[in-house]
Image (cartoon, helix red, strand yellow):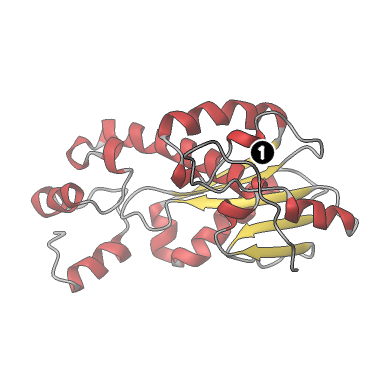
Amino acid sequence: MSVAIPSRPRRPGDRRRHPTLAYERELRRSGKRRIAGIDEVGRGALAGPVAAAAVVLPEQPLDWYDRVYDSKDMTAAAREEMVGPILRDAAVGFAMVSADCVDSDGIIPATKRAMTQAVRALGPGIDALLIDALTLPGHRMRQVPLIEGDKRSLSIACAAIVAKVTRDKVMSRLDEQYPAYSFDQNKGYGTEAHREALGRVGPSAVHRRTFLSKLAEEGVDTS
């Protein structure tokens, strides 16, 4: 589906691009009513779950839409501020799959599982899916995969914010259980300090063994 994406006015000095409702509106013109934007967080981490969220936005524009960006372009405080309006005004489904699931199924199937569970959490009646880069097996409704979807679709951007904020809270709780790895700082991603901790104390129960094996092949001590 080819859609011309309208631009929104930017604040002076703001180089970020707002995601828009262009794709959602195009799908509604084709008769689709409940359109879920889907994104995941944590796919590239060495530890912790993969989280996914699915968001169905109201058809009418709301005043907070202009404060939504790609979650990676927002500060943690800005993401936290936006979660409240999203949960208040939109329908939201959320799901996580564990590091064990990533190891047993592989990262892409595990990611799709989390996304599928997030869609199911919305309940029946979803007409179409806007998904960041992927498509999901077993769904008959229309699916539109969008590369860099969180920069282009407002629904996907909202899903990314929900998934990011929720997973970050999970990783902060895991930091209390496994303080050696500084999960509250790195959220399970392979920072230099995280890799140093792996070499010093070895992996925890929430590390992804398949990911650590790849690091070992590169000569990184994760024992």
Relative placement, left or right, of 154 versus 34 is left
Residue nearest the viewer, comparing 190 with 67: 67
Residue 144 seen in this snapshot: yes
Task: Name the quadrant of the N terminus.
Answer: bottom right
Residue nearest the viewer, comparing 15 with 166: 15
Residue 211 sits above or below residue 176 on the image:
below
Quarter of the image where one finds residue 167: top left
**Residue 77, image x and y in percent?**
43, 28
Taking the spot 63% from the left edge, 55% from the top edge, the residue there is: 116
Taking the spot 27% from the left edge, 30% from the top edge, the residue there is: 176
Total marks in image: 1
Quarter of the image where one finds residue 130: bottom right
The residue furthest left is 200
Relative placement, left or right, of 61 versus 216 is right
Taking the spot 78% from the left edge, 37% from the top edge, the residue there is: 58
Residue 127 seen in this snapshot: no
Residue nearest the viewer, comparing 134 with 93: 134
Relative placement, left or right, of 100 versus 60 is left
**Residue 187, image x and y in percent?**
33, 43
Taking the spot 79% from the left edge, 62% from the top edge, the residue there is: 141
Mark 1 residue element: strand
Task: Name the quadrant of the C terminus.
Answer: bottom left
Q: Amino acid at mark 1?
A: Val
List the residue tagged with mark 1.
92
